[in-house]
Image (spheres, helix red, strand yellow):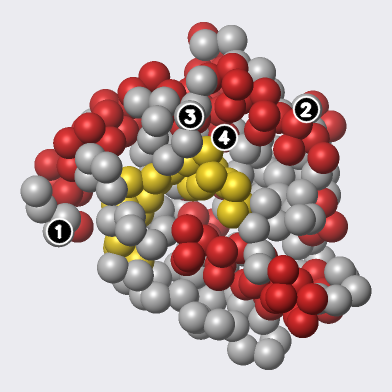
Amino acid sequence: MTTDLHDLSEKYRGVAAFDLLQAMIERQFAGRIALVSSFGADAAVLLHMVAKIDPATPVLFLDTHKLFAETKTYKQQLVTGFGLTDVRVISPLAENERDLDGNGVLWASEPGRCCYFRKVLPLQRALEGFDAWITGRKQYQNIERSQLPQFERADQRIKINPLMGWQPDQVAEYFKIHDLQPHPLVAAGYPSIGCKPCTSPVAPHEDPRAGRWRGSDKTECGIHLSADGKMTRSATVQAPRAQGCG
């Protein structure tokens, strides 16, 4: 089946998120696709959909060793509740933690390098053998994601964004209809949840991701960026320069 971005976009234009996921998992990339999930604020939507389609779909979870304890608890609750059977916990290599962040505070001085060895490199390894992966990104989350397409190509793989056009009220409605349990930190003002040291509460007037790396110009961890820090559609992620990734 075609993996040409234009052909995919034309074929699945306007297809609802669940139907798109079903086509990707059962036909387009059968046996060669994974969901990458943070088990964060909105993660239950895609996890619930995937579980309904095929609970054995691989789910890749990046445990950076800097996550909120609430995220790990929430992950286990969703995995058990949805009956997901192939959740793979991906972590940074022990030698990288020792050599690059021996005192555990690299996030404070060089967050780009911290994200690189804790997220980018582990995900690159985990995606070996897959031709496509699913993300939960949405256009409304910040200005950098406002032009997010349905399909992207990165590192010779197809990235699929089934919820790219969803609005906050659609996410909330899905949670309500399916009686999904929210991440416990959402009620505390965290609409986007990453590593504990680099995530803060968000005010009602701010973008949902305003609490990520607050006070810096960094807006993405790096797994969706090219080496120059841009949201490219076809690039292999490389190591950030000394000042860190975008």
Q: Gap in Å between the C-alphas at discs 1 and 3?
A: 30 Å
Residues 140 and 10: in front is 10
The correct choice, above or below, for 133 with respect to 101 in the image is: above
Q: Do the numbered discs 4 and 2 sit on residues whose CB atoms are within 8 Å?
A: no
Q: What residue is shown with label 2?
A: 184
The answer to whether residue 33 is seen in the rendering is: yes
Amino acid residing under circle 1: Asp
Element marked by disc 2: loop
Q: Gap in Å between the C-alphas at discs 4 and 2?
A: 13 Å
Q: Do the numbered discs 2 and 1 sit on residues whose CB atoms are within 8 Å?
A: no
Q: What residue is shown with label 3?
A: 85
The correct choice, above or below, for 15 with respect to 149 in the image is: above
Q: What residue is shown with label 1?
A: 4
Residue density around tag 1, few if under 14, some if 14–19, many if 20 or more, within 10 Å = few
Amino acid residing under circle 2: Pro
Residue at 67% x, 29% y is: 76
Q: Residue furthest bottom?
A: 242
Tell me which label, 3 or 4, sits earlier in the chain: 4
Residue at 33% x, 55% y is: 130
Q: What residue is shown with label 4?
A: 43
Residue at 61% x, 63% y is: 119
14 sits to left or right of 49: left
Picture coordinates of residue 25, whole percent (x, y): 28, 36
Picture coordinates of residue 203, whole percent (x, y): 80, 42
Judge depth for marks 3 and 4 and give the one in front. Answer: 3
Picture coordinates of residue 113, whole percent (x, y): 69, 77
183 sits to left or right of 160: right
Q: Gap in Å between the C-alphas at discs 2 and 1?
A: 40 Å
Amino acid residing under circle 4: Ala
Element marked by disc 3: loop
Judge depth for marks 3 and 2 and give the one in front. Answer: 3
